[in-house]
Image (cartoon, rainbow, N blue to C red):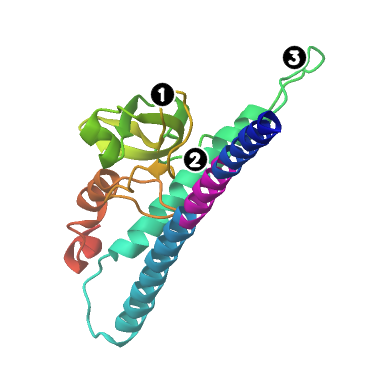
Amino acid sequence: MAIGVCIGCLRGEAALREARALILELQAELTVAQQQVAELSKVNELQAADLDRMKQALETGRSGPNQPERVHPDQLGLAFERLVRAIVDEEQKNAVQPTPSANDEGEETPSRKRKGGRRRLAEQDLPVIDERIVPPEVEACGGKGWRRINEEVTERIAYQPGRFVRIRTTREIWVPCDEQGRWLGAPVTAPLPDWAIPNLMADTSVIASIILSKYGFSCRSTVKSR
């Protein structure tokens, strides 16, 4: 009878351990979902602030008398975003165009007039600079007692003297675990960097370069002289 009771106790303890492990996994998933909700809330707040600034800029532009002919920084950001999208769309369009067949080689095709303006920026040909962000909890202990389970990768276009570059930022996701690899708590994600701007692929260095090269010294006298 005692042996049967001991076997039942062992089975109960095993089931209890499995239940606790399942609870930890569910709590970890809940924590990840809460972090995602918090990040989305931050993005919504930033977008709402951008919208308020745009409305205020439009109202100020309508009522302000004799304002200098300068472009608002918010409008510069939107213009650069459209420029980057146009570049990517053009690259994708060129990639899916069919190659000319052998029957068409003998036919004369009219020469296409070359459009003016700047050359297209091939994003895939830009040099890549990698940046990795580790959670402070993991960095403090050198990764001991933690395991990396995932990562979030974002890219932005930056300007360096004489060239454009792609900066690839990787936010690592770690979880505390024991020597057997079992989770001991909720996952931890590296914090968002200060430069993070929602729905904008341009780095501040690119925006500053455009402002200084094209719009920084724009005024009525220079426009009339042109």
**Contact (CB < 8 A) between labels 1 and 3?**
no
Q: Residue at x 78, y 16 (%)?
A: 101
Q: Name the residue under label 3.
A: 105
Q: In this view, does 111 lie to the left or right of 122?
A: right
Mark 1 → mark 3, Cα distance in angstroms? 67 Å
Mark 2 → mark 3, Cα distance in angstroms? 29 Å
Q: Quadrant of residue 78?
A: bottom left
Residue closest to the far right: 103
Q: Mark 2 points at which residue?
A: 87
Where residue 179 is drawn, which disc sits there? 1
Q: What crowding class fits label 1: few (fewer than 14 Cα within 10 Å), some (14-19), or many (20 or more)?
A: few
Q: Callout 3: helix, strand or loop?
A: loop
Q: Which residue is drawn at 78% across and 18% down?
A: 104
Q: Position of residue 218 (x, y in %)?
A: 21, 60
Of 56 and 170, nearer the camera is: 170
> Vertically, is 153 above or below 62?
above
